[in-house]
Image: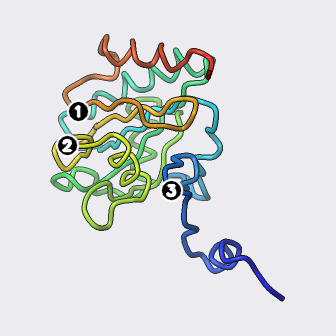
Amino acid sequence: MVMPLAAFLAIHGMAVPARAGDLMSYTLEAIEGGPLPMERFRGRPVLVVNTASLCGFTPQYRALQDLWETYRDRDLVVLGVPSNDFGGQEPGSNGEIQEFCEVNFAIDFPMSEKVAVTGTGSHPLFVELREQLGAGAGPEWNFNFYKYLIDRNGKAVAFWPSRVRPDDEEVLTRIEAVLEPAS
């Protein structure tokens, strides 16, 4: 029996290579367990944010939840991606991170398990985001709560550093623009 490579890799718990340039072809693991395929969000704008629980920017979770509550009915997805890459500010287990977010910020937007977002071990989604957005688009030059906006066509269109809050007028303006129907 001949088995396609992607099926073989998936059966054996190995990563299936994503299609180059297609942000919606990547899969993370959900914080509560199980796959979290970006494909689930195809046709919807996505704000991807690398997060941490013990960071000075952690209060931005509240603004992210507000964005989710305000725009989810218009198709915006807020996707939290915990990372311990910056000063060990996300040391907890996935369960501890999930509990922290629910108890302190009533987070109910999708979140992935903790992943690396910098360096050679960086999750491929973040590698592709940086490739699409160019110089300066990576957390290597910044910190936790770096924000990436993906449009309805699955292309990265904007990014903001940690100091730019999710409810900043510039962010809201770009979100409103990508919420327009795809052309």
125 sits to left or right of 152? left
First in residue order: circle 3 vs circle 1: 3
Q: Secondary structure at mark 1?
A: loop
Residue 148: % across, % down: 37, 35
Residue 73: % across, % down: 63, 18
Which residue ends up furthest to the bottom in the rendered image?
Answer: 1
Using the image, tell me which numbered label, if any, was put on residue 20. 3
Q: Secondary structure at mark 2?
A: loop
Viewer-nearest residue: 97 or 182: 182
Placement of the C terminus among the 4 image quadrants: top right
> From the viewer's perspective, is residue 49 above or below residue 45?
below
Residue under the image location 55 percent in, 25 percent down: 76
Whole-angstrom CA distance, mark 3 to mark 2, is 26 Å
Q: Which residue is mark 2?
A: 143
* In contact (CB < 8 Å): disc 2 and disc 1: yes
Using the image, tell me which numbered label, if any, was put on residue 137. none
Badge 1: residue crowd in 10 Å (few <14, some 14–19, many ≥20): some
Whole-angstrom CA distance, mark 3 to mark 1, is 25 Å
Q: Which residue is mark 1?
A: 161
Residue under the image location 60 percent in, 75 percent down: 13
First in residue order: circle 3 vs circle 2: 3
The three-letter amino acid code for the residue at tag 3 is: Ala
Viewer-nearest residue: 44 or 58: 44
